Image: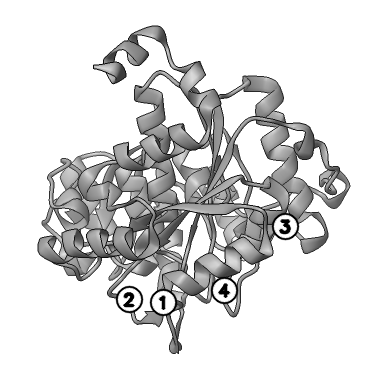
Amino acid sequence: MNSTALVYCEGNFGLMDGKTANGLIRRSHKYNILGVIDSTKAGGDSGIYLDGKTNGIPIYSSLKDAIRILGSVPDYFIYGMAPASAFLTPPDREIFLAAMKQGMNIVNPLYELLNEDEEFVKKAKKYHVTIEDVRRTPPRKDLHNFTGRILQMNTPVIAVLGTDSAIGKRTTAVLLEQTFLKKGLKPIFIGTGQTGIMQGAKYSIPLDSIPSQYAIGEIENVIMTAYEEEHPDLFIIEGQGSLSSPAYISSCIILRGARPAAVILQHAPKRKKLGDFPFMNMPSLESEIQLIETFSQAKVVSITLNHESMSEAEIGETISLYEKNLGLPASDVLKYGCDKIVACLMEKFPTLQKALPPQTKKTMKR
């Protein structure tokens, strides 16, 4: 049975900086999420705020309120935000320390390593709790350089990249994984960020915390480890940032280390400025596609939408427009599922067709 947890996301649940909480509410193999703490949305159902559907996970106004209503203290207190600064604010520190005093273990996804913070170390010992720093990397002696082994692997590698950070790449990758599983195939999702790790991805690395000398080798290594242990039908790589980003190099590392043969590109049509850099315009789909295909041997094979600020009619119109202008299949996978994208990938990679169970092949022919 999974450990119970509360996710702290004050003022940000359902928003861009609340992407860690958003992801954990949608999927968590590792924790049984009992609630979200966000006083600005207290009393609501977290599923309604995210996807317009109830999921039974409530939103509480405070840690005290959550424990009172639950009638017990959950096992873990998870920081569910991804601020650009990536460090705890003074109020955040106080809520963390209050959770520890209640006997809750801490899950910290930020760059700030709390196991190196004297106050947190003392409090953890005093209250007999643990602190997990999700972004802690292995010692340098245990990191890997790029070897080229991945060049000899024939299993399809698909990367879900985007035109900005916090745009839905991980969500699309997870839904793709689920769709392939339902068809009887064996996909492996490779997590590259803190949320994927916290969701329980078996094969994952905190890519943006690894020294650049080793980052490409580390993503190659995690893929090859999964390949040797699992023998999957395909890999789905969670993207980070964007290749055109002025500040992040993670997409570059993924394209170099994972060597994807195909890219699914996630875009938010109504987002005019970069999320972390409001003084910069969003790139166009056309410019991002050109950049990806110039920088790597990968081809962008489909477009997926983040429907923030879009009406139902706008979503449908935009999908039709993209398919007409770009000549690529497009979908909003949260609204319409992944079948169109999966069909595109099945056509591009005949080995996936061959790997289908006989019953699935019969159903598809009908």
Query: As rendered, which of 124 and 229 lies closer to the eye?
Result: 229
In-image side of 270 versus 17 (left or right): left
Q: Amino acid at mark 1?
A: Gly
Marks 2 and 3, how far apart in space?
29 Å
Q: Amino acid at mark 2?
A: Arg
Residue 82 at x, y percent in the picture: 45, 65
Q: Amino acid at mark 3?
A: Ile
Marks 2 and 4, how far apart in space?
15 Å
Marks 1 and 3, how far apart in space?
23 Å
Among the two numbered marks 1 and 4 on one chain, the one whose residue lies closer to the N terminus: 4
Q: Residues within 10 Å of mark 1 (few under 14, many from 20)?
A: some
Among the two numbered marks 1 and 3 on one chain, the one whose residue lies closer to the N terminus: 3
Mark seen at residue 57 = none
Q: Residue at x 44, y 60 (%)?
A: 96
Q: Residues within 10 Å of mark 4 (few under 14, many from 20)?
A: some
The number of callouts visible is 4
In front of the other: label 2 or label 3?
2
Q: Residue at x 41, y 77 (%)?
A: 275
For the residues bearing labels 1 and 4, Cβ distance under 8 angstroms: no
In front of the other: label 1 or label 4?
4
Residue on which the image places disc 3: 210
Q: Is residue 32 above or below residue 124?
A: above
Residue 181: which quarter of the image?
Answer: top left
User: Dot 2 lies on which element?
Assistant: loop
Mark seen at residue 244 = 4
In front of the other: label 1 or label 3?
1
Marks 4 and 3, how far apart in space?
20 Å
Q: Residue at x 56, y 51 (%)?
A: 124
Residue 229 at x, y percent in the picture: 67, 21
In-image side of 216 versus 63 (left or right): right
Residue 256: which quarter of the image?
Answer: bottom right
